[in-house]
Image (cartoon, rainbow, N blue to C red):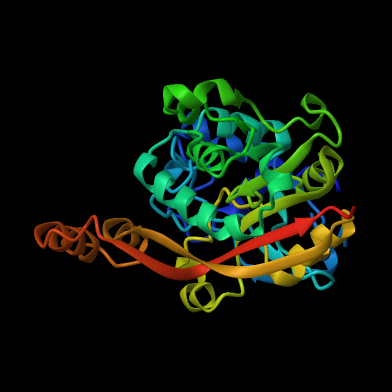
Amino acid sequence: MAGRRVPARSRATIVEDAPVTPDSPTISAPAAILDGLQGRDCPVCGAPERGARPFLSASVDPERIGALSFASRKPPEYMSFRLVRCETCETVFAAEAPGAEALARAYRDAGYDSAEEALYAARTYAQALAPRLGPEHRRGTALEIGAGSGVFLQELLDLGFAEVVGVEPSHEAVAAAPAALRPHLRIGVFEPGAHRPGSLSLVCCFMTLEHVRDPRPLTRAAYDLLEPGGLLAFVTHDYRAPINRLLGRRSPIIDIEHMQLFCPASLRRLLGEAGFGEIDIGAIRNRYPLRYWLRLLPLPGPLKPAGLAAVEALGVGQRSVGLNVGNLLSVARKPL
Ligand SMILES: [Zn+2]
């Protein structure tokens, strides 16, 4: 990881199609995330950034960075750092990004506004993961990195896991956890030293791997913490999925909180280099209420509120709809 610091002045170059001048008078506190951006090399294979191809130019408007910018399942903002694609492993990554501490602060202070959606997502992931779990996994301990309000931990308990632990940096997300799940949640970022090596039967990291500064140490630490035969499960976006290629910058995956974006090849590289065997990567269908799908759609201006009003008037806003929206479930086994 290169620790090149980007001069503060170059923040102006980050703002390309944003209506803000370099000497804009007021920059809100959350925009402090833009101070001290650091240059990075490929976060999956380590290849230098200078060998990467342009993927998407930067689009950052400091005035639009709010408390929900670093929250899960918020309305899309279509902002991103400068993204490049690694020629070696195909990972797309932010060539300049906030430091680990700035990111940890942003997620600590992140708002939480997705209780209902979190329940649907947890159900989707549990149904996709259940067929991969053997009795040897269920009688062990599962760890979820980026556990939000803990609703997936409840799914794991329902699947028969003896013990579940979640780590989550957002105070607001943990405060929204059901009382019964609070004892299973720890507020903070993932710290491998907090767990005994070889003690876990499952490590989950869902819709979180794009957000961390360094996915490699996270993946290696998960490997060390798993018992032989234990499973690591990721849910990530797939930037190569047709829907994301079609939407381009208007895709919800284009997001200032995404430090990297994956495809099957880059995930295989990440998991293989950490030592995992039996790597299985496939698309999953997310099930959400119709009103949530509509909120995600990149509709112009008044069309979105009109569409939302229409589905509510028809009484179908709550109806559950399953769609392949370019998400991948990766399950990898630590060799025996
Ligand atoms: Zn790479």
Tell which of 195 and 103 is nearer to you. 195
Residue 113 placed where, x, y %? Answer: 38, 38
- Visible residue check, residue 28: yes
- Horizontal side, residue 118 vs residue 216: left or right: left
- Horizontal side, residue 299 vs residue 91: left or right: left
Outermost residue toward the front in this view: 135
State ligand 1's quadrant.
bottom right
Tell which of 254 and 218 is nearer to you. 218
- Visible residue check, residue 212: no
Count of picture labels: 0
Residue 38 placed where, x, y %? Answer: 75, 44
- In the image, residue 288 sits, relative to residue 36, either above or below, namely below
Tell which of 238 and 179 is nearer to you. 179
Residue 300 found in image quarter: bottom left
Which residue is at 85% across, 57% downward? 276
Which residue is at 39% across, 42% downward? 114
Outermost residue toward the left in this view: 313
Tell which of 133 and 166 is nearer to you. 133
Which residue is at 87% across, 41% downward? 224
Residue 287 found in image quarter: bottom left
Residue 186 found in image quarter: top right
Residue 28 placed where, x, y %? Answer: 46, 32
Residue 62 placed where, x, y %? Answer: 49, 43
